[in-house]
Image: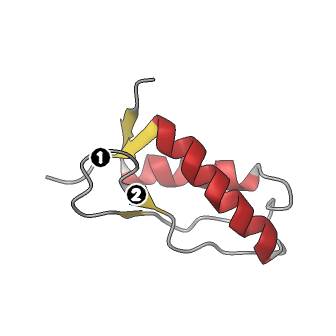
């Protein structure tokens, strides 16, 4: 599978949409992502914070792991040079 590069805004939007599509996470949101320094292969970004809204933390924890795995296989963060 070929992975596609996304800028920070694009990848944040994708992560936010993916999180909200998970069961019990309709009111949660991803305010932003962070790039991981010195990562050359694999997922080079993380979701450091999530706004829960009315979602339960257990639902959000599970969903964040799912989003990381699923989107991490498809997209990488384009880092500023």
Q: Find residue 64 and report its horizontal and vertical position in percent.
A: 64, 61
Decide: is 62 above or below 49: above
Instruction: Tell me if 42 is positioned left or right of 11 in this view.
Output: left
- Picture residue at 36% right of the left edge, 47% below the top: 7
* Image quarter in which the N terminus is found: top left
Answer whether residue 28 is visible to the viewer in this image.
Answer: no
**Position of residue 29 in the picture relative to residue 1 (left or right):** right
Residue to which mark 2 is pinned: 45
Give me the disc on residue 58: none
Q: Nearer the viewer, mark 1 or mark 2?
A: 2
> Cα distance, mark 1 to mark 2?
10 Å
The furthest residue to the front: 41
Q: Position of residue 49 (x, y in %)?
A: 55, 74
Estimate how packed mark 1 is, as few (under 14), some (14 to 19) or many (20 or more) residues with alpha carbons within 10 Å: some
The one of 54 and 73 positioned closer to us in this rendering: 73
Question: Where's residue 10, x and y in %?
Answer: 46, 46
Residue in view at x 51 percent, y 65 percent: 47
Quarter location, residue 6: top left
The residue located at (59%, 64%) in the rendering is 30
- Most extreme residue toward the left is 81
Q: Is residue 4 above or below residue 51?
A: above
Q: Residue furthest top?
A: 1
**Residue found at x 85% / y 54%:** 23
Res. 36 visible in picture: yes
Q: Compared to 17, does 30 lie above or below?
A: below
Mark 2 burial class by Cα count in 10 Å: few <14, some 14-19, many 20+: many
Q: Which residue is mark 1?
A: 78
Between residue 17 and residue 71, name the one nearer to us. Answer: 71
* Tag 1 and tag 2, C-beta contact below 8 Å: no
Q: Secondary structure at mark 2?
A: strand
Q: Secondary structure at mark 1?
A: loop
Q: Earlier in the sequence, mark 1 or mark 2?
A: 2
């Amino acid at each position: 599978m070929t992975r596609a590069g996304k800028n920070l805004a694009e990848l944040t939007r994708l992560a936010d949409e993916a999180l909200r599509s998970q069961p019990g996470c309709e009111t949660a949101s991803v305010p932003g992502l962070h790039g991981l320094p010195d990562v050359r292969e694999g997922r080079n970004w993380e979701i450091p914070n999530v706004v829960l809204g009315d979602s339960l933390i257990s639902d959000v924890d599970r969903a964040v792991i799912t989003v990381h795995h699923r989107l991490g296989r498809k997209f990488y963060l384009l880092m500023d040079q």
